[in-house]
Image (cartoon, rainbow, N blue to C red):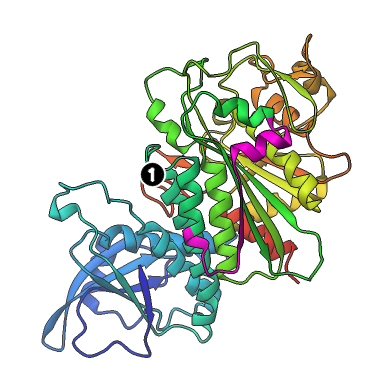
Amino acid sequence: MKIEFLSALPAGSDGPVARIVNQNALPGDLDPALVAGADASRFSGKAGQFFEGFVSQNGAVARLALAGAGEPGSKDRSAALEKAGAALAAKYAASGETALTIDFTGSRLDPAEAVAVLLGARLRAWRHDIYRTRLPDEQKATLATIRVVGAPDGIQTAWEAEDALAQGVELTRELVTEPANVIYPESFVERVSARLKGTGVNIRVLDDTEMAALGMGALLGVAQGSVRPARILVMEWLGGAKGEKPTAFVGKGVTFDTGGISLKPAAGMEDMKWDMGGAGAVAGAMLALAKRKARANVIGVCGLVENMPDGGAQRPGDVVTSMSGQTIEVINTDAEGRLVLCDAITWTQKEYDPVAVVDLATLTGAMIISLGNEHGGIFSNDDALAAKLLAAGETSGDKLWRFPLGPAYDKLIDSPIADMKNVGPREGGSITAAQFIQRFVDKGRPWAHLDIAGMVWAAKPGQTWDKGATGYGVRVLDRFVRDNLEG
């Protein structure tokens, strides 16, 4: 979607005009007929409320809309403003209108607040209809442009950073939405590399031969049942001080997860195309950081595999040797994400010696049982790092909830024949999965694990997304970088 900033609305411009309205504060210059209609519809300006009416202006009929922004100064002000923009996009996305004007005149919003409205509209308008060849005309997306008038000074500069963020979220949604016959390890690398071309991000790719030479038996064990070879995609953004150690983001990228020999039930298995949501979030975050020229050194690493159950697939009971040298008894081949992450994290630590590692993964169904679709889970060996990520989640809207780690949980993954097994008991499944990953984190290195299984895909529309891919993870990583890594 294109965002245009205009000094005034050109004469004869068509399409609806929208105003952003604070709660119980209708603008005094509204047409009395519109005010009467809003009152009759019980529109009060609550966050996300929408009202539309038609009035006569200069001998023509004008289509005017009001979007509620909630109470000024509220704790969730930014989220409320995003809801206002999202409400407008949801209404007009497939309305037949090609352009919408948002008139900020008299709104008293500062640049950051006005930008929140635009970001909400931009994110809510995103759609992925390329495979829908028989879509009825009334359901086709038509809204292509948002014109901005009456905006506060400085909004265009403020929008540049949020436009970069939106591009990152959109890339993540695209990757998560694409089917597994389109996005698999090799094509994931190709798609992301193409999108990052020219941004200043340096791309490295490890193929399965190189990974075998490095001893990545855990990651490659997951991939051995698929005809699609594994890959590790590395994205280097060095926008900070020269020579300063980077922070590393590591994503689980299981481009399709059948469960392997421990086969998942058929019902709903099609959803497992989004089991690469962690890697998708890392890729989107790296695009956002590069596009806005973040003043930080960040390494993004995506471990990419497909988990299939052919005659060459690993079996329950197999023992694999990870790059770290630790051995793993594979009790359940459907607990594969942690096998991918352990080798990807080991390699990242050896290659870059990062100041901190944050991994993201759609790791456990148990996380969805614990938190539903409202928060991602966070586990960490470092209270300061956890606090920074929790704060970033609260500010960005990609909310997190912290879970415990400890020796009592750790002993549940001890194996009688290897250093560890890849699953513990049913109880505390998300925690034992995190304990598994922690065994591969270097002593003394700050690390956080984000289990985002319930957050990357939505069964119903949300605040700034339609049904489907949410783009979760990009915003929390971007906010973490803004608040903690950039001087």
Q: Secondary structure at mark 1?
A: loop
Q: Which residue is mark 1?
A: 178
User: Which is more toward the observer, 86 or 475?
Assistant: 475
Quadrant containing the N terminus in the rendered view: bottom left
Visible residue check, residue 32: yes
Quarter holding the C terminus is bottom right
Quarter of the view holding residue 107: bottom left
Q: Is residue 392 magenta?
A: no
Q: Quadrant of residue 265?
A: top left
Side of 357 where 265 appears, left or right: left
Residue range corresponding to the magenta coloring: 194-216
Q: Residue at x 55, y 29 (%)?
A: 223
Q: Quadrant of residue 140?
A: bottom left
**Mark 1, residues whose alpha carbon is within 10 Å: few (<14), some, or many (≥20)?**
some
Foreground residue, 446 or 73? 446
**Which of 127/276 is in front?**
276
Give the residue at the far left of this rendering. Answer: 59
Q: Position of residue 12 (x, y in %)?
A: 18, 87
Is 258 placed left or right of 242 in the picture? Answer: left
Residue 393: % across, % down: 63, 52
Q: Is residue 207 magenta?
A: yes
Q: Is residue 457 above or below residue 145?
A: above
Which residue appears at 66% of the width and 40% of the height?
Answer: 210
Q: Position of residue 440 (x, y in %)?
A: 78, 34
Look at the image and tell me whether residue 49 can be seen.
no
Residue name at image x 17 percent, y 48 percent: 135
Residue 30 percent location from the top left of the image: 29, 79
